[in-house]
Each structure stands twice: as structure tokens, then as C-alpha cells.
Image: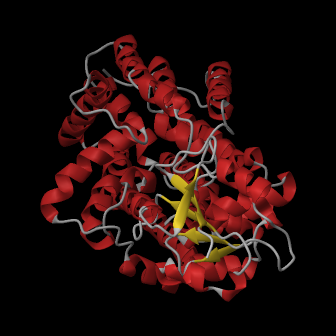
Amino acid sequence: MAITKHREGRGSLGLWLLLAFALLLRVWKLTDKNIGLDESTSWYLANGSVSHLISWTADDVHPPLYYLLLKVWLWIFGDSLVALRSLSVVSSLIALYLFFRLIERALPTAVCYAAMLWCTLSPLSIYQAQETRMYAPATAVVLGACLAYRRWIESGATRRSALVLYAIAVTAALYLHYYTAFAVVAIWLHFLIVGARTAAPDRTFAACRAWIVAHDAVVIAYTPWIAFAWAQVARGQRFGPVTIDEIPDYASLLIRGLTFGDHPLPGLLSWQGVVAVGVLAAGGVCLLVTIARTLDERDVFYACVAYLPGILALSVLPLSGALELWWYVPYCSPLLVAAAALGLSHTPLPSRVVAGALCAGALALLPSVVTYYSTSEKDSDMRPIVAYLLAHARHGADAQSDPVYLLPIYIEYKLSYYSRDAIAYQWVANDDLESLARDPASEGKTVWLVVDMHSSSPTIAEVSQDASLRPVDVPGSNPKRVRLFQLAAH
């Protein structure tokens, strides 16, 4: 089926209705879940000095731009849980708007709206819209880069403003998350294969020169961070080794994660997997078959940006270590939908049938959305622990405060978000629990210990066996995720 041209800006009412629906989904139960471990790190960095933020991220696994944006955001709106997560909510809505503008020229009207509905209901998009992390903003700027690049290509490589916006978006993307570089590689591949040929014959050299100049500007803007980025990428995260023969399993997890969001992930042979992943796979096959016949530049673009970043992310797993890759390349989720919609639109199927298939895939996402909303907590909920300590432990700025120790130490940010400066937390040196009793500063005081599920040595179960520590029953707390102990009198 030939795809007819559509004017830009069509269907504004439908677009705004879908965005309003998306907003409703993304603010519903926005504060029901506790602040997560990574979210508390974002809060901690955004509340510190800029110099500390930069030095921290220079040695971390993520670049600094998101934390800087969050710092400004919190300065304006405060640091309530609504304020913390609202930056991601807004970013998610911007991403949806840019997605619609990206596909509106490539797809029939009904198919365009069906693809937009899919992304509106995307469990991954909803989850990341309620997460105080860089993933929703990174998705928005990658889609912004794709849109600006398409506008430049569609103008015959003459629309300089579009190329400038592309360079700005690419720079912002690289400062938000390192794995956005895979999207830039995909766009580069498209330009090298067919993109440069979209310019008039007498402008091909000028188009290539403008392309190089734009990326020279990106490199110059990114130069202050290149050394840090290289060191972090070379070091990897090392969450666990990944062998080559494990890549297919990680590919399955990536597809399911991009489609259904976070755990639990439906199996590919479940009805949700058959419907949603089946639609994506069928559309992808149709798109690749069409490319093999025609090598249309637009088809090549969507194939590159939808599939290449995921392939590259999988290929570096042996170096980076085990990762939940759908968090690292979330921008692939809407692009996979766009590629599938375009591929199915190339078949003899009527537009309403293609739109129906996409709507069926979107409806298959609903059980995962319901599961997300019904989940009561993110990792371990520290609110009951903090409430108990505020009620039962001596706290304040004076020297008589009860010492509160943590395992592992980095859960301090989660606890501090709820207790602020009311409680001072301490570190168990070398995970040596006996040091708690030997600490002369604890004499005559009640010593508390908070052990989180992230503590691998010792674990909550191992600490529970220690005769010198008495488990405390904290109302509302999940002892499998976080446990409060009290040091026996000595």
C-alpha cells in the first residue's frame, strides 16, 4: 500500500486528547510508591553543590546533565516527591509529542494515532515517567534529534535550523546518557547509506560538509567530558559477566523489557507476548523486506534507529557486564513501534486493519500497566523504618543521639530523604558488625542497624542470625526487603 503524503500538524485535537490521556496515566498514583534507591541518588546530587555533582558524576556511570536539570527544577518547585518525579512526567509528554511529529508524515492518519496510543500505554514509558532518573529526558532528546534530522533530510539538506537543532539534541543526549550514542551511530549509518543522496546533486558536497560541521560542534561541546566518558565506558559496570552464548537470552529480555517495561516480564509465548511482540516482529519483517526491494531512505532511517541501538547495546554486554538494557536504550521502544507501523503500512492491508493490529498490540500492554500500578513499593520502602526511628530513637544535633548504622551505606540517601537532617547515619566499617559494640561513642546509647536487601555481605538473613542483634518489628515494613535491628545491651 502506497503511503500518501500528509500535511504537518494534522489532527491536532486527537493529538492533544492522547497527550491528556498520557498525562493522566503518568500522574496517577505518582507518589504512591516510595522513593527508589536510584531516585534518592538523584535527589542527593541535585541538592548538593554543582562542583560536588560534577566530581561525583565524573566517577559515576552517568553523565551530569540530568542532575543539573533536576537541580534547577527542584530550586523552582521544591523537592517533594511530586516535584522530584514531575520532570520525568513532563519529559515523557514531550517525548510523545515529538514521536507523533516524527511519524505523522510517514504513516496514514489512523495508523499514526494507533502507534501513538501504543506509546501512550507503554508500561516502560509510564514507569520511567514516574522515575526520578534521566531515562525519560533521554528518550525525549533522542526523539528530538530524530525529528530534527528527518526535517533536515526532507528539506533536501537545506534547512539549517533543523540541523542546528539536531546538533543541540545530540549534545544534550550524550550529556544525559552514554547509550544515546548508539542512536547517533544509527543516524550516521542512515546518512552514509542513503541520507546524503537526498540532497540535490549540486548540493551533495554542501550537505556532507554541513553534516560534518554539525558533528564538529557536538564534539567541541562534548570535549570537556570526553575523558570522563571514555574512562567510564572502558571500566564498565561489572554487575556480572556476560558470555557470547548468553546474548540471545539478553536479546529476549531486551525485547520484552522495551515492550512490557519492568518486572514481571511476560514470556514471548504468553498471549501478551504473542500479540504485542508478534505485531512488532511482523511489522519489522515487512519493513526489512521492503528495504531489500526499494532501499527507500525513509524506510532505512526507521530500521536503523529502531534496531541498531539495541544490537549495539547487546554487543557491548561482554564488556559492560550484565545490564537491564531496556533501561539504557528506552528510546528504542517508540521507534520499534514506528518501524513496525511503517512496515505493516507497506503491505496490501488497509490502513484500518494496520491500525487495528497496532491497537491490539497496545491492549496487550494493559496487564503490565495494571501490574505496575498495583505494585506498592520500589525496591525497599524506608518510610516505616524512618517513622519508627523518629519515634523511638534519640535523635538531633546533640552528642546524646543514638547511632544509626547502615548496610550498605548508600541507602543513606533513601533514609535521609524522609528524615532529612533529623537523623545522622553512620557506616559499618568493612561490614564488621562487631565494631558496633566496640564503638566507645555508643556507650550508654541504643545502637540501631538498618540492613537493606542490597547488602550482599552480610545479607538480611545472615544478620538475623547474629545473637548480638535483636530484630525490631516495624509496622508496615517489609522484612524481606529492609530490616531494622537493635544492638543487645552490653
Identify the residue at horizontal 68%, vertical 19% (top origin): 13
**Closer to the camera, 473 or 49?**
473
Q: Where is residue 202? Give x, y as percent.
A: 43, 60
- Residue 298 is situated, as x and y percent measured from the top left of the image, at 37, 42
At x 66%, y 37%, the residue is 32
Q: Is residue 84 above or below residue 456?
A: above
Pinpoint residue 143: horizontal percent, then vertical percent.
53, 48
Q: Is residue 465 left or right of residue 416?
A: left
Instruction: Report the colour scheme.
Output: secondary structure
Q: Residue at x 51, y 64 (%)?
A: 177
Q: Looking at the image, which is closer to me, 432 or 456? A: 432
- The reply to whether residue 58 is in sight is no
Against 78, residue 94 (above or below) is above
Q: Residue furthest front?
A: 490
Q: Who is closer to the viewer here, 210 or 172?
A: 172
Percent of width and height locating residue 395? 81, 67
